[in-house]
Image: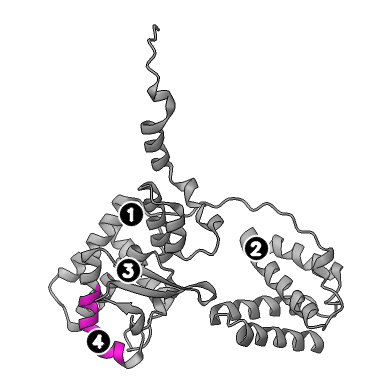
Amino acid sequence: MEELQSNISSFLDDCKYMKGLSDKTLKAYMTDLKQFSDFCYEKPWCEKDTIEEYIKNLYIRYKPKTAKRKTACLKAFFHYLERRDLILSSPFHKISIKRREPVVLPKVIPVFVLSKFLETVYEKNSEPKHSNCYYRHTVRDIAIVELLFATGIRVYELCNLKMSDVDIKGKFIKVYGKGSKERYIQLTNKDVISALKQYYRTYSDDIKSTGYFFINNRGNKISEQSVRFMINKYAKLVDADLHITPHMFRHTVATLLLEEDVDIRYIQEFLGHSSITTTQIYTHVSQNAQKKIFTKKHPRNKLKIKVDM
């Protein structure tokens, strides 16, 4: 087991210093490999049978997407060991995993609910100010919600925005996504820009002090959990009978852009997907766009035939 622990430590160092993977990815790898290590207690950890048994156990305990991710981590680990000549050959060369994942359609926020949600956030800000703290909170809430929907950024991308990543005057933000991949997103809506300006005026001292753009109540970088809690709070006020998460804003804007006939390649770049396959999930959701296209452009509609029924 000491050998396995040493190899795991070496692999994580390689991921951090050579590949430059994010802290979030490293944390996930660490958790996955500890789980594998615990499973292999008093078992031959490098043998095909042990790994197959472990993978089978993953698919029993977890949803297919999670099991697939954990398996991919393990495969990367053994590939690293083989590449560094720490083992003769990766057991994965002899393991075949062919599982069809069920297509899980992304959950979106209905437009009427989204409209009511935004109205509620702004209404809270326009209420008589109970305190300066209350006003600051609502100004921040507006800026976060507007930015989530305007840009489709992931919640961890939003929380990690630095002051230097948000150019209100230039009307764009710089985002570091998965694998620290950098992308720029334009800000084109005047209400979004106005919300960010108001937020910056209110929090400028805290922003300059921490270097991060979105600040929590203690003057530090806001956490993902705080954003989720805030979104949930307004969802309850809207009483939409729908559990709304920050990621649903991302799904919603992507789906609505597709329904407006925006090219899927632009949506891919907008969302920061490395593969077009990931973006194509939204084509399953966009039934309204399909209906409009078929109504206007289906060739049957051009055939004028007299029908006597």
Q: Which mark is residue 240?
A: 1
Disc 2 to disc 1, C-alpha distance:
30 Å
Q: Which residue type does callout 2 highlight?
A: Tyr
Dot 1 crowding, Cα within 10 Å, few <14, some 14–19, many 20+:
some
For the question of whether residue 244 can be seen, the reply is no
Dot 2 crowding, Cα within 10 Å, few <14, some 14–19, many 20+:
few
**At which x and y percent is residue 290?**
42, 39
Instruction: Give the residue drawn at x 62%, y 64%.
Output: 66
For the question of whether residue 23 can be seen, the reply is yes
**At which x and y percent is residue 165?**
36, 80
Considering only vertical position in the picture, is 64 above or below 29? above
Pointer 3 or 2: first along the chain: 2
Q: Specify the segment rendered in magenta.
A: 196-208
Instruction: Give the residue drawn at x 37%, y 37%.
Output: 292
Disc 4 to disc 1, C-alpha distance:
34 Å
Considering only vertical position in the picture, is 260 above or below 93? above
Q: Residue under label 3, please give it.
A: 147
Secondary structure of the residue carrying numbered label 3: helix
Pointer 4 or 1: first along the chain: 4
Disc 1 to disc 3, C-alpha distance:
21 Å
Disc 2 to disc 4, C-alpha distance:
44 Å
* Quarter of image, res 22: bottom right
- Which of discs 2 and 4 lies nearer the camera? The answer is 4
Do the numbered discs 3 and 2 sit on residues whose CB atoms are within 8 Å?
no
- Which of discs 4 and 1 lies nearer the camera? The answer is 4
Do the numbered discs 2 and 1 sit on residues whose CB atoms are within 8 Å?
no
Q: Residue under label 4, please give it.
A: 204
Dot 4 crowding, Cα within 10 Å, few <14, some 14–19, many 20+:
some
What secondary structure predominates along the stretch shown in magenta?
Answer: helix
Q: Which residue type does callout 1 highlight?
A: Ala
Q: Residue under label 2, please give it.
A: 62
Is 82 in front, or is 36? 82
